[in-house]
Image (tube, coloured by chain):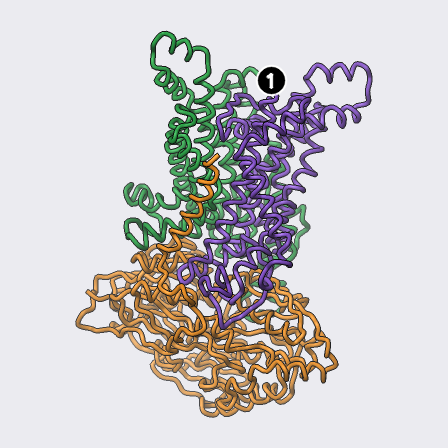
Amino acid sequence: MLRLLCVRLLAMVPLLVIVSFLIYSLIALVPGGPEVALAGSNPTPERIAQIRAELGLDDPFLVQYWHWLTDVLHGDLGTSFVDHQSVWSAVVAGFPVTLSLVGLTLLIAAVVGLALGLAAGLRPGSWLDRLSTVTASAFMALPYFWVGMMLVLVFAIEMRALPAVGYVPFSDGPVEWLQHLILPAVSLATVPTAVVARQTRAAVTSVMQEDYIRTAKAKGLRPRRVAVKHVMKNAAVPVVTAFGVEANRLIGATVVIEQLFALPGVGKLAYFSVFSRDFPMVQGILLITAVLIMLVNLAVDLSYGYFNPKVRMS
Amino acid sequence: MTRSESVDVRKKVGAGADGAPAEDGDDLAVPVAHGRGVVRRFRSNRSAVVGVVLLLLIIVVTAAAPLIAPYGPAQVDISDRLSGPTPGHWLGTDTLGRDTLSRLMYGGRVSLAAGGLAVLIATVIGLPLGLVSGYFGGVVDWFLDRAADVLMSFPAIVLTIAIIAAVGPGLTTAMVSLGIVYAPRMFRVVRGSTLEVRREVYIEASTSIGSPSLLILRKRVLPNIMPAALVQLSFLLASALLAEVTISLLGLGALPPTASWGSMLGQAFQEMRSQPWLAVYPGIAIAIATLCFNLVGDGLRDAFGREQRKA
Amino acid sequence: MRKQLIVAAAATFLMVASACSADNGESGGGGGEASKPKQNVACPPVDQASVDKSATFTWMYSVANTSFDPDKITTSNSWMYLYPVYDTLVRIDADGEPVPMLAKKWTIGDGGKSLTLNLIDNWKYHDGTPFDAASVKANIDRHRADKSFNKQALSDVTGVDVVDKGTVKVSTKSGAAPLVGILASSAGMMMSPKVFDDPNQARMPTGGSGAFKVTAYEPNTKVEYTPVPGYWDPKAVNVAKMVFLISSNDNARLNATITGTADSTFLRSSMYKPAKDADLVVCQKPSLASFTIALNVKKTPFDKKEVRQALNYAINREAVNELQGGFCQPGVQMFPSSYYAADPSLTPNAYPYDPKKAKELLAKAGLGNGFSFTLETDNLDAYQRVAELIQANLQEVGIKMNIQPVELPKLMEGFSVNKTVDAIMVQQKADADPSIQVASYYLPDGFSNPGGYSNPTINDLATKAKAAESRDAASKIYQQLFKTAHDDAAQPVTLCHLNTPLAMNKKVMGVEIYVDGSRQFRGVAVKK
C-alpha cells in the first residue's frame, strides 16, 4: 500500500510539469493582456507599453514560463497584476471557504444519499423506493444554481431564517459558519446526493440477492437487518465513488455558487481573476486546483482499492 | 488514475433506475449477439421509452420552430415587456417584450445543438483514441492515459471559462472547449471496454489466425464497445446541457440576440423578482431534457447489461 | 411506469410553486403601463438627535478597489474606497459644486493659469506627519509623476510652489479651472510623504489624511474603516465603524441589503421593484453618467456625417429608458442639458425617434440597402439587453448590428488601443472635470476617439474652456462646443443619462447621491 502510494505520488510529478506548462501557455498566449486596464483612464500608448514591459509580458514566452516555473518550485506563485497581493496568500485566504463548502456538500450528499439509497434498495418497487428514485432523478435534473436561488428566496428573504450571503470562519463561531454555508451547500449537494443514492440502491439490491442473505433468511434471521449491516460496512464504496466522480464538477460549480452567495472563496477569486486578466492569479489557482484534483483522485483510487479487495488485486 | 474513471463506469452501471444491479463495469464490454433482444428489453423499459418519446418530441418541436413558433425569436416589443401569460403570448414575454414560447422553441435548437456538438467532439477525440489505447496497449496506451490524466485534472468549467476568456465568447467556442474537456471521459470508457473485449477468447483466436489489427478493431471490437460508448454518450449529453446553462449564466454563452435555454435562464435571473415565470419555462425545459437523456442512458445500459447476464 | 411522469411533474411543480412563492404582485404586465419612478427622491437626512454613535454602517458594492494608494489604483471605481482614508484638497459635493476641504479657500490667478490654495491648519496625517504646504507639493508632484494613475489628469500642471507653510500655488500650461474638480479626485488625495515609497500602503494604508483608517481588509471581499480620533471636521463622523462589502452578483447584493447583512447598496433597474417591495428606502437622483455608443470614425461608413445622424434618429431612446425601468433619461449630448457644461437647447427632441428620416439619411449617404457592423459591449446582462434593443431598432432601418459581449479590459483594448473595433457601447462615468471627457472623445488623439475625429472649432473651444476663469465663462464655451458637436453629429452617440438609485434600510441617514456618480459616505449615520 505504502509503495503504491509512493509510486503514484512520484508519477504525479511529470504530470504536474505538463499540466503547469499547459496552464501557463493557455493563459500567457492569450492575445492581449491586462495592461490596458491597468493603465488607468485615458492612458497614453507609451504608458501601456511601459506597463507591459514592467509585467514582463514582452519577454519571450519560454523565458516567461521558465521564470514562473522556477518561482513556483521555490514556493512563489507570484503576485497579482491587479492588486499586487501574493497569489499564494490570496488562494490560502479563499481555500478554507471553498473547502468548508465542498466538505459540507459532500457530508450532506453522503448522509442523505445513503438514507435514500438504503430506503429504496431494501424494498425495491415499494412507494418508498419510488419516492426515493423520483427524488434522486429530480436532483439530477434540476440546475443547482436555480435551486440555490429558490432556497435564498424562501429561507433568507421570505422566512429570514438563514443569512442570504457572506461567510463566517469556523473559528469565529461554528454556528454562524454553518448558518452561512447551509444554503449554498444544499444547492451544491443535489447532484452528488442523487449519485450516492443510486450507487447505494444498486449496492443494496445486489447484496439482497447474495447467497448468504438467502442463507440468513433460511435460518430465520431478518434478511434486511443483515443486508443493512453488510451495506453499511461497505457504505464507503458508493460514497467514495460518488465523491471521486463529483469532485471535479463541484469545483466548477463553486464558481457560480460563490457568486450567488457572495462567499469569498477560490471560485469567486477565479472568476474575478479570469475577467481582469490577472494571469498570475489564474495560473496559480489552476495549478493548485489541478494538484488538489489529482490528490483527490489518488485518494479515491487508493481507498477504493482498500474497500474493495477485488480491485486491489487487479 | 485509471481507476477513478472505471469508477465512473461503475456509477453508470450501478445506477439502475429500475433496480438492475450490476456489480461490475466489465459487463458493458460484451458481444452484442442479440441486437433484437436489446431492442426488446429497451422497449419494455417504460422509463426509457418515455425518455425517448419526450426527447423526440422536443427535437421535432424545436426543429420545426421556424414553422410553428408564433413570433420571431428576436422580435422586440418594448411596450409589452415582462408580461405574464396572455392570449397573445401563451408563456408571456421577456424584458425586451420577446415571446417566451417562441424563444423557448428556438432556444431548444441552440441548446441541443450545442450539447450535441460538445459530445460529438468528445466522441470524435475520445472514441478512436480509446480504441487504439485499449487495443494496442504499451507505450501508446501509457502516453494517452497520462494525457487523459492531465485533462482530467483541470476543473472542467474553470478551464472552459479560461479558454473562452482567451478566444472570446460564443457558444461554439464554449462547446468546442467543453468537448475537449469531456474527451477523456469518453476515452476512459472506451479504453476500459476495449481492454475487456480484447481479453475475450474469440479476439485471441482471430489474432492468431492473423487478421490485420485494423480489421479486428472495426469488425470485432468496435461493435462490442458501442454499448458502453452509447451509454456514456447519453450521460455526457445530459451533462453538456447543464454545462451550457452554467456557461450562459456567467455571460459566456450564446451571443445576443440568440436564444438558448441557458441564456434564457440567465436573463430570467435578472428579472427573477419582477417576473418569476421567466425562469420557470427554460428551467423545466432543461430539467426535462436532462432527465430524458439520463433515462435513455439508464435504459440502454440495462438493456445491454442484461444481455450479458444471459450470455 | 408512473414514476418518470412523477419526476417530470414534480420538477414542474417545484418550479411553478417557487415562481408563485416569489413575490409576484404584478404578473399581468410589469412594463409599459406601470407608472415611472420619479427622477429625484432625496435620501433621509441626518437627524442629529437620534444618531447612534456606536453604530456600524455597511455598504455593498459590485467591484473592489485595486489599491489603497491613490497613485497605484487603476480604476476610478477605487476612489470610493479611498475617500474615507484620504481627504482631498477640494471636495465636490453631492450637487457637483466645489466646496472647501483640506484647502479652506482657493483663487484662480495669472489670467486663469494658476491656482492658489490656502490650507487648513493644525491637521496631521494618520502617521503623525504634519499636514502643510510642503507635503501638498510633494503629493501633487508625486501624482503627476510618470507612473501615477493621476498623471493624465494633471498633465497640464507645469509646477507646484510652496508660498508659505499654509499656501500652495499650482501653475498650468493652458488653464487652472479644471484643476478645482481634478483636485477633488484621487489626484487631490493627500497622503503622508513618509509612506510614499512603502509598497504596503497598497493594502494597508497608514499615511491617510481623512476621517477614517482601514482597520481590516480582505481583498475583493471586505474593507473595515474606523474613525481617527480628533478629526478636523467632527460633523463628518457619525458612526463607530464603516464596512464596505463587495459582491459582483446583483442578486447577492440585493439579498444582503434586504436581510440586513448590508445597510445599503446601489440598484440596477431590474432591482428597483424588488427593493421597494421589500420595504427598503430607495432614493435616486439623475447623474452625469450615460449609456454611450462610441464609433471609430475611420471605419466606413461612420466617416459619413449622414450615417452618424441616421444612427441617432434610428435609436428609440424612450424605449431604452423603458427597458431601464425609467432610470435612463433620454439625452443627445455628452451631459444632461441641465448641467453647466452642456447646451440647454439640445433636449432629446433634437434627435426624435424617426426611422423614416434615418432611412432617408442612409439613402442620401448612398447606403439605401443598409450596412452591417459589430458593436462590442460589456458582458454584463444589463448592457447586453440595451444592445439587443438597439439592434432591433437598427434592423428596422436596414442596419445589421452584430453584438459581441466582452469583458471590460478587452473592450478598451480592441476599441482604443488596437483600434480594430467598429463601435462599443459603454456606461460613460463622469470624470473629475468635463474637459477630460471632451478631450477623450472629441480631440484627435483622444483615448475614446480611435478614428481620429477632428473638428477645428471643437478643438479650439476645448482649449478655451480649460482656460476659462469661472464656471460661468466655461459654461458659455461648453454650450458652443456641444452645439458644434451636435451640428457635425460627432461621435459618440449618447443614448441616455443614468440614474442609479440607492437602497437602504430605514435606520440609515445622511447617505447622499453624488451627481458625478461617485460614491461617498461622508457624514453617514445610523438611527438608534
The answer to whether residue A24 is visible is no
- The tint chain A carries is green
Q: Is residue A95 left or right of residue C355?
A: left
Instruction: Find residue C480 and report its horizontal and vertical position in percent.
Output: 55, 91
What residue is at 37 percent from the left and 58 percent from the top?
A: C245
- Counting the numbered discs, the total is 1
What residue is at 64 percent from the left and 32 percent from the top?
A: B229
What residue is at 72 percent from the left and 28 percent from the top?
A: B132
| B42 and B297: which is toward the camera | B42
Looking at the image, the residue that sits furthest to the left is: C49
- The chain displayed purple equals B
Q: Amino acid at mark 1?
A: Lys
Image quarter in which the N terminus of chain B is found? top right
- Residue with the mark numbered 1: B310
Q: What is the secondary structure assignment of the residue under circle 1?
A: helix
Instruction: Find residue B170 and report its horizontal and vertical position in percent.
Output: 62, 55
- The chain displayed orange equals C
